[in-house]
Amino acid sequence: MTQLIGILILSIFVENFVFSQILGLCPFIGVSNKFDSAYGMGLAVTFVMFVTGIVTWPLYHLILVPLQLEYLETIAFILVIAALVQFVEIVMKKTARNLYQALGVYLPLITTNCAVLGVALINIKRNYSFAEAAVNALGGGLGFLMALLIMAGIRERLELAEIPASMKGAPIAFITGGIMAAAFIGFSGLI
Amino acid sequence: MLKTFLNGIWKENPTFVIALGICPTLAVTTSAKNAFGMGLAATFVLLGSNLFISLIRKIVPDKIHIPVYILVIATFVTVIDKLIQAYSPALSESLGIYIPLIVVNCIILGRAEAFACKNPPMKSVADALGMGIGFTFALICISSIRELLGAGTILGHEVSFIKNPALVMILPPGGFFVFGFIIAAKKYFDSKHQGENQ
């Protein structure tokens, strides 16, 4: 149990997907200019990452390893993620109308979010057990959600600030992200 | 053909102009050597997928073209991943999961969608080469700056005029800073250029 909590803290703070692993930057820069859409995107990514973590672990250890097809991991994972995103979209449309309306537009984008494939690959690379993999995926998603929310909060204020014209938009977002990443280095001694 | 090739390197440089595929751009540019390896791997995948997709562009049904493209790309990524593991274990170790993550690099799917599915094979290869070299060029630019400021070296050789390199530049924040300033500079020069034309 202690170890699982350790992995959760590790994946949310110490090895935050955005700030320390530099994964999932496209939505981090692209969808962080409004707080509401950042919240929706973050929740959708967290959900898909968690499910991906749960699905890809048995896929690798119970199907690919016994068949000695480990080299197919990249192909198998990306197919599963693409199918999973579609599946989540359909289920959500039928059962949770409100949630679908809030997250719907972000779901198709998640297939090409490198944080999702990244978490599946990291789980395999680090030889995590099933529970550890699930916790790592959940923590990764929560860390992403947190990063997106902080960024959206800052960017809403930045819109009102006076900055040079050529720094507006993406450049200032990257610099802000850099300062936040520097702050996150502070967590590196935590575990 | 030459125009298609040059287009990718400068005018439509995938990284600086269209800002595609930024995750590997920031993650692996800690040294020029890593950046070069990543650029070559991505160029190989681009070449393979663009050529193959251009060859099968008339057979693939429209409805399932994206899954088919992703499969083609994933196949080439697996090939280059295993090749690097076999011939350069050290590079494979330092690039880590970013090699398999080429699958979700938007540049590659983007070029398949925007170019290879509409153009003949030879032209698609030229486009892939141009985009690939453009991407490699961008990676090397960013990594040279980060390596010089963060480790005080150029291509692994120490330089004498930097006494105390700022380690933060080769840590993740450095990537954000350098990339932010590069695209800001590009925006500045573009707006100046436009002003002159008017």
Image (cartoon, coloured by chain):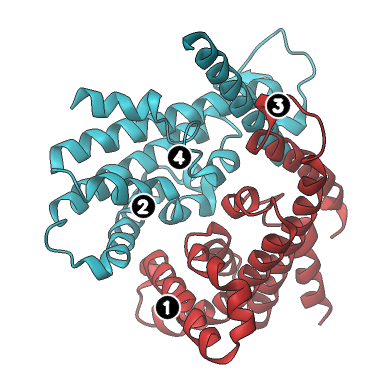
Chain colours: A red, B cyan
x then y, percent, for residue A189: 86, 52
Write down the chain letter for disc 2.
B
> What's the distance in space between the residues labelled 4 and 1, CA to CA?
28 Å
Q: How many C-alpha atoms fall within 10 Å of the one at disc 4: few (<14), some, or many (≥20)? A: many
**Residue at (65% x, 78% y) in the render:** A134
Q: CA distance from mark 2 to mark 3?
A: 33 Å
Mark 1 secondary-structure assignment: loop
The image quadrant of residue A168 is: top right
Residue A182 in the figure: left or right of residue A141:
right
Residue furthest to the bottom: A95
Q: Position of residue B36 (x, y in %)?
A: 45, 32
Q: Amino acid at mark 2?
A: Leu
- Camera-nearest label, 2 or 3: 2
CB atoms at circles 1 and 2 under 8 Å apart? no
In the image, taking residue B158 as reference, residue B12 lies left or right, namely left
Chain under label 3? B
> Badge 1 is on which residue?
A65
Name the quadrant of the N terminus of chain B.
top left
User: Can you identify the residue that label 4 sits on?
Assistant: B38
Q: Amino acid at mark 1?
A: Val
Which chain's residue wears label 1? A
**Mark 2 residue element:** helix
Tell me what residue is drawn at x 84 percent, y 45 percent. Answer: A183
Total marks placed: 4
Q: Which residue is mark 2?
A: B109
